[in-house]
Each structure stands twice: as structure tokens, then as C-alpha cells.
Image (cartoon, rainbow, N blue to C red):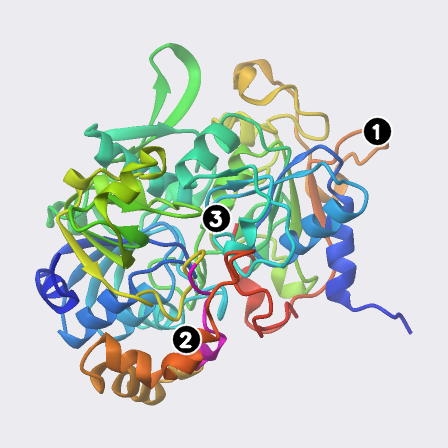
Amino acid sequence: MIELTEAAALVPDGATVSFGGFTTQRHPMAFIYELVRLRRRDLYLYGHSPGGDWDILIGAGCVKRVELAYEADEAFSTVGTRWRLAVQRGEIEWEDYSNFAMVSRFAAGAMGIPFMPIRSMLGSDVLARQALSDEQRAADPRTCPRKLHVMESPFAPDDRVVLVPAIHTDFAVLHVQKATVDGTVRIEGQTFADVQQALCADTVVVTAEEIVAEEVLRREPERNPLPYFAVKHVCHVPFGAHPYAVFNYYDYDPRQQVYHDSARDDATFQWYLEKFVYGVRNHAEYLEAVGGPARLDSLRADPAYGYRPDLKRRRLD
Amino acid sequence: MADYTLTELMAVTAAREIRDGEVVFAGTGLPMLGAMLAQRTHAPRCCIVFEAGTAASQLAHLPMSVGDARAMPGAAMAAGLMEVFTYVLQAGRVDVGFLSGAQIDRFGNINSTSIGLDPVHPQVRFSGSGGACDIACLAKRTVLIALHEKRRFPEKIDYITSPGWVEGGDSRQKSGLIRRAKHGSDDPGGAALPARHQRDVPGQLPSGPHRPGRRRRHRICPGHRGGDRDAGSHA
């Protein structure tokens, strides 16, 4: 067990990192805000469908290069606002894959094999084109020298597969419902690719809503997707995914539309960073800034659903 | 005056593409709404799969993303992306997947990545594939939902995020894709049948053989999506 601030400080400039969660769910946001406060630079991020976690890091200038399938925060916006601006302004390097390709890459790294064959991306420009040049790839060991490789099955000549390269990151950071001080992890609901991301990282940091006794999680080991030896550091961070949702704990916060409204413009984005990140010293002060206990209580999940059925949210049209 | 909105019309149209008992791969937004509607009307046994990890959701409230906790209550399985993409989608268990995008060409190829001829320096960047490319490659049937605007249907799209019939003819099959290699007829069995056993000459979107009793392989639902949602649903 370490403090959140200590854990975030372990990540140096230029580190390769992946964060758990999926678009609007279970991102380790408290950890992310800490990285922004630490003004980390030149991070290399790997993800399938990140959301506001990547968007704020990109906007705050913390990120050099990303490999991804999707960047959007679907509760609020169908394209990550700062991601879009960074690409259009030439401020970020990236490579596109599909979600299946990215999770297969994490899985290959987690299994200790160099690549995974999949039947996706054939016939697409996700396969045919690359955003990172061969020179950029060759110059940096944090990026695979080749994006992918198409081959015929050695067992059936006409059967074509796409080999996608394994990912190994310096860090994986997950936010989960429950963990023990020793690092046994309980994820409730969809697991996304958290398990594969953790198992292909050198150092795994887990932030958890609750710290529970080892014997509690060991009563149902089939529900623990990560063994303690895969996890290096555990931090107790209630509401650590705010403004995003944690199944069985709280729903996402529709008031955080303010992030996306602010992110469209450089000046208002700076205002957001000052008010909610740089201007607060830690996660406790952040939670006060977004409305404190009254606001947070209004987001708590209804136990019958695991979310908040009466949440006031945007209509589809 | 119609007493329904265009969004409602699109949701109803999407729902009618789902048959009872089918496995449906649904993305955020209208596909989810259509799948929910189908489940509550003519297709109570349709199995709604979300790429974030759930299968057979019994949706009580519309999820805001495929990872939303709203996918959980009543679901038969909650796992992760790896399980859904490998055992469900790649293995050939998805009957119908929904797709959308900023640009769609006459072969049903879709762009949800970027606008601009050079994708390394695009004029407009979108979210990217997500699972859309995977669905386009590996579902037995796909349905496209998009606002019918002229700019959305150029002759040539800037980036093929999700392959349809690629360049027409037998180019989809030649690219190595094993499903929907044959245009306009029932899928002969997905992964069980290697691509080399599926030989036919695929047509193009406007002339697709939508004859009764045959499965339509690539449908475009008319209607409307507003605001910044032009990059399409997460798929």
C-alpha cells in the first residue's frame, strides 16, 4: 500500500503506460490528475478505447505518442476533444489499430509470446496504412519496428491472418472495486482489457474503491482476475474514477460535461485545468471542487442495478 | 405531421433488421436503442453482445457506452474484450453488427477515422475504429446507420476504417476476409468454411440483391444524427 501521490511519482517522463477502463468506465482518474499535476511529459500510451483519461493528459501536454483503436468519451462526446485538436495541429504521434487488434496485442504481451494472429483488419486502411513512419518506428524502441504483418496460415495455404505485435509497458494503472493490501484484485462487472493490460506491464499500480481483507477475496478466488504477485502497488482511492462510473459503486457524473465544453477552446481548457487539477492539491480537494459529499452521494449506485437508474443525462438526439 | 422523430424512425428501422434469436453486436447510440426495441417487441430472444464484455444483456436503461453498467443487469455473461472478440465475434457467432461513420462509399466501406487525403495530417480527426473494423470484418451481416447527407456518400472515401465490399467484385474475398465473401446470399457458415470455399461475384451497394427470403448483407438505414455525432457510434 502506498499513497496515490507516491504511486504517480513513480512514473517518469517518457514512460510507456496503459490505463484500465473503457470510454466512460473505471479509468484511474485520480492517478491521471496526479500525473497532470506532476507535469509529466513525453508519455507513450497504449489503449483500446480510452476516454477522458487520455484526453486530459493529451490536452495538458503530457503525451508524445499513442497507439490506440478509439478515443472518445461517449457519455459526453463522440470524439475526444483534445485528442482531435492535438492530431489536427500535429501535436501528437499516433498509430491506429482496431479494438480487437489492441486487446490481442496486450494479450500477446501478457502471455509472453511475440504476436497474436487475428482475422480482422484485412481489406481496411487500418491494415494498409500507418501513421508512424518506418523511420519513427526504427528510431524508438518503445514502438514496434513494424505495425503488423499479414501471413498465410502454415497449415492451410489460402487462410490469411494478421499478426499484431505484443505490447509490453513500463506501467499499467487500473482502478478497481476492491483490492487487498497484498494486491489481490476483485473486478466487478465487465473486465474490459484490464487483465491483459496488467499482465503485460512491468509495474502494476491498482487504485481501489475499497481495501478489504485478504480472506474476504480468497473466499471466492474465481472472481479475482489478478493474483497478488502481478500487482506491485495498491492505493486506496474512493471515487478514484470520478467523473466516470464504477459498477456497483457510482455512476458517471453528467456535470462533467463542463470538461468537454471547456476542452473545445484553449483558454477555457486552461481554466478547467486550473480549477480542477492544478488548483487543487490532491484528490480530496478535487472531490470538494466537483461538489463534495452531497454531489458524490447523488451518484452512488442503486444496489439493485449497480448504477443510478434516475441519473439525469443527455438524450440520444 | 408525423408524430415521431427521425431518431425514433431510425431506431425502429434498426430494430426491424434484428430477427428473433439472433446474436447482435451493438454499438453505442442508435444500434443499442434499436436492439432494446427489438428485444421488447418482435425479437425477445435476441442476444445483445457488447464488445466491452457482456453477452445477452436485458437492457432496462439505455447504456451511454458499451462499457456502461447499464449493460450488466440480467446479462448471461460479463467478461472482457478478449472473450467477446475471440470466442464470440471471430469464432463466427455474431449474426448481425451495426456500423456507422462519417463517410460511406458505394461498396459499403466506412470511414470513421479522419477526413483528408493524408491520414497523417488530417483536416478532421474522429475517434477511430474502436471495434467497428472488427465487426465489419467478422460479423455475418452488417447494417449501416447514417444520416443521409450528400457529403457522407462520396465516390471515394478518405480512409477505409471498416471494410465493406472493398473495391467490389471478389476483392473482399481476395483481401482474405472469411465472412460475407459472397455478396447477397446467406452466409454459408462463417469460420467453419474457409474463404477458398466461398466463390461468387459480389455486387455493389445500390444494386444489391435484396430479394425476399434472402438475407441482406449491407443495409443502410435512412435518418438523422445531430451535432457532433457524425463520427458514428462506438462499435
Residue A108 visible, this angle: yes
| Region rendered in magenta | A249-259
**Total residue callouts:** 3
Instruction: Check contact, mark 1 vs mark 3: CB within 8 A.
Output: no
The disc labelled 2 sits on which kind of residue?
Leu
- Mark 2: which secondary structure? helix
For residue B148, side relative to residue A294 (left or right): right
For residue A183, side relative to residue A242 (left or right): left
- Residue identifier under label 1: B213
What's the CA distance linking mark 2 and mark 3? 39 Å
What's the CA distance linking mark 2 and mark 1? 53 Å
- Mark 3: which secondary structure? loop
As rendered, which of B145 and B18 lies closer to the eye? B18
Does A236 appear in magenta?
no
Q: Where in the figure is residue A69, as x and y percent of width and height?
A: 38, 50
Instruction: Check contact, mark 2 vs mark 3: CB within 8 A.
Output: no
Chain under label 1? Answer: B
The disc labelled 3 sits on which kind of residue?
Thr
Instruction: Check contact, mark 2 vs mark 1: CB within 8 A.
Output: no
For residue A17, side relative to residue B24 (left or right): left
- Residue identifier under label 3: B161
Q: Are marks 2 and 3 on the same chain?
A: no
Residue that protrudes farthest toward the top in the picture = A155
The disc labelled 1 sits on which kind of residue?
Gly
Image quadrant holding the N terminus of chain A, namely bottom left
